[in-house]
Structures are given as C-alpha cells and as structure tokens.
Image (cartoon, grey):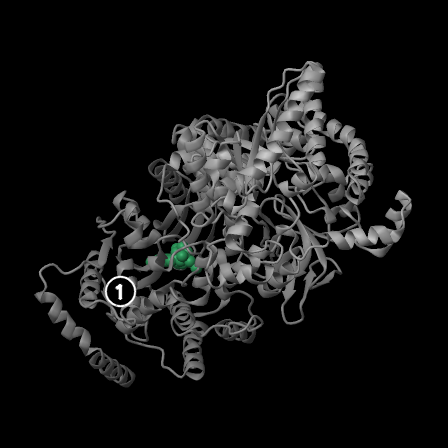
Amino acid sequence: MKRKAKTTSRTSKRRAVARPARAKRAAVKRRPTPAKFVFTFGGGRAEGNAGMKELLGGKGANLHEMAGLGLPVPPGFTISTAVCTHFYANGRRYPSGLRDEVAQHLQRVEQVLGRTFGDPSNPLLVSVRSGARASMPGMMDTVLNLGLNDQTVQGVIALSGNPRFAYDSYRRFVAMYGDVVLDLKPQSKTDIDPFEEILERKKHARGVKLDTELTADDLRELVAEFKAAIRERKGVEFPEDPREQLWGAIGAVFGSWMNDRAIAYRKLNNIPESWGTAVNVQSMVFGNLGDDSGTGVAFTRDPATGENIFYGEFLMNAQGEDVVAGTRTPLPISELEKENAEVYGQLVKIRRTLERHYRDVMDIEFTIEQRRLYMLQCRVGKRTGAAAIRIAVEMVKERLIKPNEALLRVEPDQLNQLLRPTFRPADKEQAVREQRLLARGLNAGPGAAAGKIMFHAEDAEAAAARGEHVILVRIETSPEDIRGMAASEGILTARGGMTSHAALVARQMGKVCVAGCEALTIDYTAGEMRVAGTPAVLKQGDDISIDGTTGEVFLGRMPTEPSEVVRVLIDRSIDPKQAAVYQQYAQLMQWADRTRHLGVRTNADLPDQCANALAFGAEGVGLCRTEHMFFGEEKIGPMREMILAETVDQRRAALAKLLPLQRADFEGIFRVMQGRPVTIRTIDPPLHEFLPHDEAGQQALAQEMGIPAKRVHERVEALHEFNPMLGFRGCRLGIIYPEITEMQARAIFEAAANVIAAGGKAHPEVMIPLVGHVKELQLQADIVRRVAEDVKREKKARLSYAVGTMIEVPRGALTADAIAGVAEFFSFGTNDLTQMTLGVSRDDAGRFLMPYVREFEIYQKDPFESLDQVGVGALIRIAVEKGRAARPKLKVGICGEHGGDPDSVMFCHRTGLDYVSCSPFRVPIARLAAARAVLLGTPSLGTTE
Ligand code: ADP
Ligand code: MG
Ligand code: MG
C-alpha cells in the first residue's frame, strides 16, 4: 500500500509538469472545429477503412476495415499519422487536445468491454502497436499487456483464476516495455538480451528448459528482477501508473519513426520520411491463457509458390510474436483443425471472406483466447516473384481480378526470380554422397545461392563491397540486418518459421533464403557454426551453398543451373506443356504484349544471344556492337594490323581480311532475326583497347606481324589518351579513317544481300555513334548509303535499310532537329549520355556515387542503373521533340542499360519512344514494365527531384 502511495505522488508530480498541455486544451475548446486525431475501431464500429492508410497507417486502416466487415477484432483506436507529423514539426510535442481525445476513446473501449484501464479489480489491458503507411517490418516493436502493475496483476489473477498466466503476461510486459520504451536492449552484435539473460538464469536455477515450465512464483520473481535490471542499468523506475505507461509507449512509437533502423529501411525501400507512423492502441486478447488458447499467423495462399492453399503456423498457449520469434517451433495451420475444429472452420471462412473482399492474398495474425477467435491484423501478403505470377494468373482465372490488374500485381523485377538459377541435381546428388548435405531448414526464399559465410550484417556488406558472394548466416535476423541481407546472395537462419523476419524480408528482396535450420548452432562470439549430427565446424569465410526451393544447406560452393522458364525457352530441354511455372509466365507475358505500346528489342552482338532474346520475346536488335566481334580468335590479328597500319593501302589490306569475317557474323544474326530490324553500330571504342598493353604481348604481336617490337610500342604510346572516353572514338574514327566505315557497311549490306538471296529476310539499320554535330553524321551516312547502293547494284539485291544515329552526346540532343535531317532514326545511348550530362565517368564513379545516392541523396538511384529523368531525361525530351519536328516519322529508341530498368522504361513510354532495347534476360522485364506504363498512365514527370 505504501508503495502505491509513493508511486501516485511521483506520477502526479509528473502530471504537474505536463500542465502546459492542459492550458492548450482550453485553447482548443475555443476553436470551432478541433481537428480529429483519434479513430475508433471494434465493438461494432469502425471510423476508418482500408482506404485510409495515409492517415491511419497500414495496420490501423486494415483493423478498421476488418472491424467494418464484422470480423472479430478486439476494440481499440488509432492515433493518426497527422500526430506524428505534428510531433516532428513541433519539437516532439503533441497537438493540443490529443490527451483528451485519447482519454475519450479509451473510455469507449472500457465501456464496450466492461473493464477499466488501471482498475485493480477489473483492469483493461492494451497493446500499443506502431503502423506506418507502408508496412515496415519491426520498425517499433509492439508492447503487449500494457496496464499491468503490482495492483492490476491481482485483478487479472482474480478474473482469470490463473496466477501463472497473470505473471507470465506481467513479466512479458515489463521486458517489452524495458526493451522498446526504456531502450534496455543488447548494445552490440555479440551482446545478450538482458531480459533473456535473467530468464535463462531463472530456468537454469529451476532446472527447466522451456518458459512454459516456470511456475507462477518463478514468473513473479522475474517481474521483480526485470524491474531491478531496469533500475540498475537505466537509472529509472519502471512506471507503475498505467497512464504513464500508455504515454510512454505512444511516445516510443512516434520516436521510433526516426531511429536508425527505421531510417535505413525507409532508404532501402524509398519510403519518404514525411509519411509518419500511426499508433494503434488495442484491447488485449490472450493466447497464453492456457492450452485452449493460442496465436498464429497465416497467408491466404502459399507466399513462396503461390499455391492456393491455406498456409500458416500457430502455437497453443503462446502470445504475440512467440510464433515468429523462433523460440518454440510452431505447428502448420492444418494441425489447428485437430486442436479446435470450430475455430479452424471459422478461420477458413475468414480466409475466403478476406480474399474476396481484398481480391488479393492476405497475411493475417490471429489469437485464440479460450476457444474464441480474434483477428489482430491483416495486410496484403508479401510473396516471391514466382508466387506473385501464379497468384495473379490464377486470380484472373478465378475471376477475382482482370488481366490488367494481374499485370499490376507483378513487379517487373520479380520476373527475375523465374529466370533465376537452381543447383544441378547431379551436383546435389554428389554433394549428398560426399556427405556435404549439412542440414535442412525451411524453403523460405526460392532459388540457389552459394558463397562465403558471414555471421554479421556489417561483415556481409563489407565482403559484398569487395565483390565477394556472401551467404548471411544468423540465428535469426532483425531489421538491423537489412542492409547486410540486401548485399548477400542468400540468407540462412537457425531459428524462425516461414513468416519470420528473415523469410519475409528475403522474399520481398527476392533473395534466396533458408530459415529455421534448427540443426545449426551459431556462436557469434567465437565466429563459428556447428551442425548437429556432423563434425562440421564452419567459420566466417567458409563456402556454403543453400537451396531456398528445398531448404537444403550444403558444405562448399556448388555451381547453379538455369530455371524452368530458361530451360523451356533457351535450352529447350523441357516440354512447355510439362512446365506449369512457364505457362503462368507465358500467360502473363501474353497479357503484357497485348497491352504495351513500346516495342522491346535486345542488345546482342552474336547470333546465339539474339536467339535467346527472341525466345524471351525481343522484337529486334536495338544494339549490335560490332567491336565485340573483333575480339574473336582469328579476328583480333587483322584488327591489330589495321590499327598498326601506316598507310591507307596497308589499312585497306587489313580491312579486306576483316570484311569476310564481319560479313559472316552479320549473316548469322540476320538469319536468326528473320527480317526483324537489326540496329548495327559502327566501330565505337578507342583503338588502343584492341592492342596489348604489356611488354610480352607487344613482343608477340611484333613477331607475328614481322615488324620491330619498337614499332608496336610506339604505336601503343601514340594511341594513349588521357581521357579516352572523350577521345578518338565513335564516329571520329570513321571520319578520320573512312575506309573502316566503308568496310563495315559493305560487310553489313553484303550479308543482308546474301541472306535475302538464300530466301531469307534482313533489315539492317546502320547506327553512327557519338554524333554531336550533324556534319559528323552526314559524312558517315554518305559513306554508308553509297556502299549500300554499290552492293545493291553489284548483287542485284533489293535491300531495305535505314541510317541513323545514337544520341549520346549532349550536343547531339540539343541539335536533334538538324541531325534528324540526316538520321532516319535515333537511339539514345544513355550510358554515354548520362556520363556526359552528369560529367561523371562511369568507370571512375565508384568512390563517390554510392555515398551520393545512399548518404547524401543527391540522386535517388544510381543514375547509371536508373535513368536520371530530370537531367538526362530533359535532354531526351528535347531530342525527341526537335527530332520529330524535323522528321515526323523519326523512329526513336533507347539502347543504354536503362532500357531494362522498369522506371526508365516507364519514362520512355511517357516520352513517346518507339522501343526500348536491353540485354536478353531483361527483355521479359521490359515487356511487363512497358505494359504497366500504359496501365499506370501519366504520373507527374520528373519524379527524381
Ligand atoms: P508487428 O508489426 O511486428 O507484426 P504487431 O503490432 O502486429 O507487430 O504485434 C506483434 C504481435 O503481438 C503480433 O503477434 C500481434 O498479433 C500481437 N498483438 C498485438 N496486439 C495484440 C492484442 N491487442 N492482443 C493480443 N495480441 C496482440
Ligand atoms: Mg515486430
Ligand atoms: Mg503484426
């Protein structure tokens, strides 16, 4: 009793300090319409709905929606994101009137449930849950059982008749409050959780293994010990006053919006800081109230494969995150039918209700309190790329959604997962024979990955930055690890289920993941991992291979092999009819092709690359780099002769040797492309790239050509440039040495004529690189057109062809009207155009470009990966406009790396390009991105600033 008096006087002092809020409250009452900051849900009401995510956050909005649907949601209220915004705009102060509004809404919950917050005989307990607009896994951990203190716990004992349960709830609350609100958590990566430590000590002292084996008295002692730890390490008393607890937790949620891991997550996922989080205060239901209670999580379909089955896990006599924390291994949801058929049936019905209502796969949390089911969360379920495609295609068949919606349900980059490699069965069998199959975990993120073990996210990040392949191995992952996870090829955890943090985040990132591999014992301090039943001791840096499709973990590094889609399309080793995944892919692609306006071509230099790209749906070649052909065995010799030539005659002699070789290459490409347009770029790189730079290589070359080594050396020296990217390259080569362009044009047109003569088709488009001035193009185009006419005459061939240019020099873009007078097409070479517009050398940007993006946010993304739409984009727009003004039928495409980047593809669509061109494996991604660009319409331009 004494203690109570003391506490009350302390808290009343605090209230006195908080007086200013009361003064403000009076001011609010004078205002005509006070802003509404708090919204009620549950108990037969819902002030919000799923459409109000901006204001109520994702979790809140969906709680309101479920309550509105009449699902059993424990009543509570949401404090809106507007409060978070106000909080940070006003030196971390709440809007006036908020306290009153919260008090009123709390009162309503009390009335609905017939309990009173802080009432020692009949206490209401609540959870305080964060909820941003976009789900941010673990941004601020939820505090459960709030409202418990030494008095109210007696009320819970009296009401439940279960002291063990009451003290179990109480010790969980004190630990969560200490961790989340009072910040008593592990400080370094090898630290142990202070509350865990005390708990382990207690279990050890009592000679038990599981939390559930501790008695009520043990748990009551834990409460006192936890509080003592808080006092000792943080120098504060654990607050006994429920209202102080409540506002402490609310403050911690808003405060967590600006903690390091939340900021890191926002950066990685492009979530603006201005969005803010909401806070949900919800009456507690208890899954730890005995063996007829429990808690679980589920997906309405399998989030790894997309299969239409109810998919989830649960634990009886457990609370909150016990299921995902990995301390006890949960049971599959189908087992719930045996535990309680009625609750299971109800859940299955809710599964249907939610899918029909949201028309999507949902991820749900539920709790069973003494045989009664409660819904605690639902949100659109994260899924693998493979699952996304299957779900989208099947939901169209089930008439839940339309094909256009299906296209919007799959992120273009998710297609990568269908194209991702797997391990070869033979390699796996051998690994098994050699006893290198170490263990089996859950198949949480499909695909195959191999690399060096790293036990800490920071180490994984550092190793990946050095270019190493890394597998991040953790007991379990937490939001602090996300950057390390992003840098790794794959993630392996010892604990946690299919819905653990590691599994969720890996699937979202498209990473290979094996979770809950319980055979592993990981010792962070020693930096090693042991595997039960094997003598293996693995250290940081050792090689392992993980199969996220099967959950297997292997010692050593195994090579990977192509996916099903790749085997159907490229290897042609599987019959498409036998390939279910392929068929879903093909269906989605068919819808995409029907919808998109942009053409999709490929960047390919060799016939087999062209064939791959065609299989992936390419409609032409957007960029064939001829210089890649010169590196072939028998070609580099004549090429070097050509470069070392001292007279025009010598050069012509060397070029004459190259002509038949290039012609054969082009014939191969034309045959594969069967009359589809093939854009061939004339020689582009600086010539010194073809010469040997080392002494030995130069000696050998000299010998081969029968000239003194000194000559070779001199020529290499003479070709040296301080700034080769801005030097003697591109059309400049062909202007100074017109015979090179002549030879290339002849090879192209003779190849086309030969293919046509043999009954085939060919449509070459000759592209002149690095044009900044129309005269440059004119000089080169004249040569190309003259040679074309010569070949037509000589071969009596009917050739159709076009001559155009790459727009990759800013001056070229700015004078596009003049250039279009000569060019029949433009293709934006956005690699060079980015380099020259930003004045950033792509080859030397490593040192500063990462911090430019990550740290200083100068660019939102690496401008060499995703087009700088504001800067480079402006030049593209100018060039398109001026070019089309001069030549309305000008064909315009893009052939830089950006042609396969979904955001850049959207930009190309909005800017009215005719096609994009990208590497063969990105063709499907570009097709889908192009279709989505049509469906998403025209958002505001210039999105990067
Ligand atoms: P997260 O965003 O990390 O999932 P949640 O707010 O959903 O955090 O809560 C964490 C866990 O606590 C979940 O398992 C959730 O179902 C449970 N939980 C939250 N509120 C309550 C409540 N009022 N009663 C019972 N369990 C709750
Ligand atoms: Mg959490
Ligand atoms: Mg949750």
Q: Quadrant of the C terminus?
A: bottom left
Callout 1 crowding tier (Cα within 10 Å): few <14, some 14–19, many ≥20: some
Where does the image place residue 672, in percent across and percent down from the top left? 67, 24
Q: Whereabouts is ligand 1, in terms of quadrant?
A: bottom left
Q: Say whether residue 551 is left or right of residue 355.
A: right
Q: Residue at x 45, y 67 (%)?
A: 260
On the image, numbered disc 1 is attached to which residue?
86
Instruction: Tell whether circle 1 marks a residue whose Cβ is less than 8 angstroms from ligand 1.
Output: no
* Residue closest to the eye, 775 or 347: 775
Residue 100 in which image quadrant: bottom left
Q: Residue at x 47, y 62 (%)?
A: 264
Where does the image place residue 821, in percent across and percent down from the top left? 49, 32
Secondary structure under the numbered disc 1 in the rendered image: helix
Where does the image place residue 902, in percent across and percent down from the top left? 49, 42
Q: Say whether residue 536 is left or right of residue 765.
A: right
Q: Is residue 755 visible?
A: yes
Where does the image place residue 210, in percent across and percent down from the top left? 53, 65
Residue type at numbered disc 1: His
